[in-house]
Image (cartoon, rainbow, N blue to C red):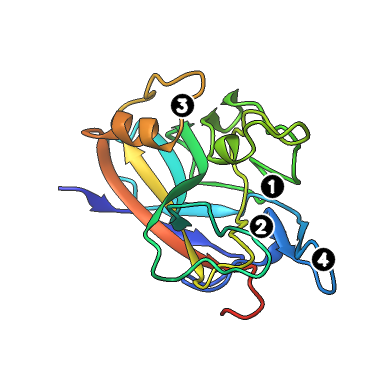
């Protein structure tokens, strides 16, 4: 049986909109580009209630509302329909967080947009995996690269639905998941299976569509 962790993010109420400072992009009023890059700060996140035997933590943030087909995404004169099936997009994969940790400060894993992405791998706070901006910007001469650590919301500006961002913290019974290189959310979730002593989630919402939400 998995116990519950209490997860808290002070920057917004659980289930409420995420402030733009923690997003990859914000709405750009009176701009033909629709959006502008934003603060892209990782939020201050805290957790409590880890059971005895916890040897490390992992943080995974995902958005389950991403369009399954890109055909209409950010296309002038078109919208991404609410009826379109949705898939997961991982925004933050951080594993092997030391057992004595009970939270991370704002900006600890991202403080601004880094073209080409932040390096995955070991950091002072744990081991970064890659997020799905790695795939989104693949082949882009200016932005392409491995996007390690946290990169915040940037849903399609023409999407009919509000997106939900689930920040989940896992208490694990191992010091290390022994992941390295370009591992992402699916690989981290597979590795932690069978090692979860407790978990908890905190949700934020976000939209770049001025006609939604």
The residue to which callout 1 is attached is 107
Residue 12 higher or lower than 44, as above or below: below
Q: Is residue 167 left or right of residue 118?
A: left
Tags 1 and 2 in contact by the CB under 8 Å rule?
Answer: no
Instruction: Say which residue label 3 marks.
Output: 183
Position of 20 relative to 49 (above/below): below
Q: Work out whether residue 125 or residue 16 is closer to the camera in this orientation and state it.
A: 16
Residue at left offset 37%, top offset 36%:
186
Q: Position of residue 43 (x, y in %)?
A: 61, 54
Residue situated furthest right in the rendering = 30
Secondary structure under the numbered disc 1 in the rendered image = loop
In front: 69, or 58? 69
Q: Secondary structure at mark 3?
A: loop
x, y percent for residue 106: 66, 51
Q: Secondary structure at mark 2?
A: loop
Say whether disc 1 or disc 3 marks the residue closer to the N-terminus: 1
Residue to which mark 4 is pinned: 32
Q: Kindly report which numbered mark, 1 or 2, lies closer to the viewer in this rendering.
A: 2
Decide which of tag 1 and tag 4 comes sooner along the chain: 4
Of the residues tagged 1 and 3, which is closer to the observer?
A: 3
Quadrant where the C terminus sits is bottom right
* Whole-number angstrom distance, CA of label 1 to CA of label 4: 30 Å
Image x and y of residue 4, in percent: 28, 55
Quadrant assignment, res 212: bottom right
Disc 4 or disc 2, which is closer to the eye? 4
């Amino acid at each position: 049986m998995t116990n519950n962790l209490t997860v808290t993010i002070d920057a917004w109420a659980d289930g409420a909109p995420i402030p733009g400072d923690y997003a990859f992009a914000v709405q750009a009023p009176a701009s033909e580009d629709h959006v502008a890059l934003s603060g892209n700060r990782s939020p201050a996140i805290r957790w409590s209630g880890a059971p005895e035997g916890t040897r490390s933590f992992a943080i995974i943030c995902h958005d389950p509302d991403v369009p399954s087909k890109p055909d209409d995404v950010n296309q002038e004169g078109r919208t991404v329909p609410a009826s379109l099936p949705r898939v997961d997009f991982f925004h933050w994969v951080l594993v092997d967080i030391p057992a004595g940790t009970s939270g991370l400060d704002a900006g600890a894993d991202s403080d601004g947009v880094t073209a080409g992405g932040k390096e995955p791998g070991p950091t002072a706070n744990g081991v970064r995996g890659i997020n799905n901006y790695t795939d989104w910007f693949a082949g882009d001469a200016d932005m392409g690269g491995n996007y390690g650590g946290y990169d915040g919301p940037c849903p399609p500006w023409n999407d009919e639905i509000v997106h939900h961002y689930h920040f989940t913290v896992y208490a694990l019974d191992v010091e290390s998941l022994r992941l390295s290189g370009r591992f992402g959310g699916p690989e981290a979730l597979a590795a932690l299976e069978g090692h979860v002593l407790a978990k908890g989630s905190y949700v934020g919402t976000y939209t770049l569509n001025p006609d939604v939400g």
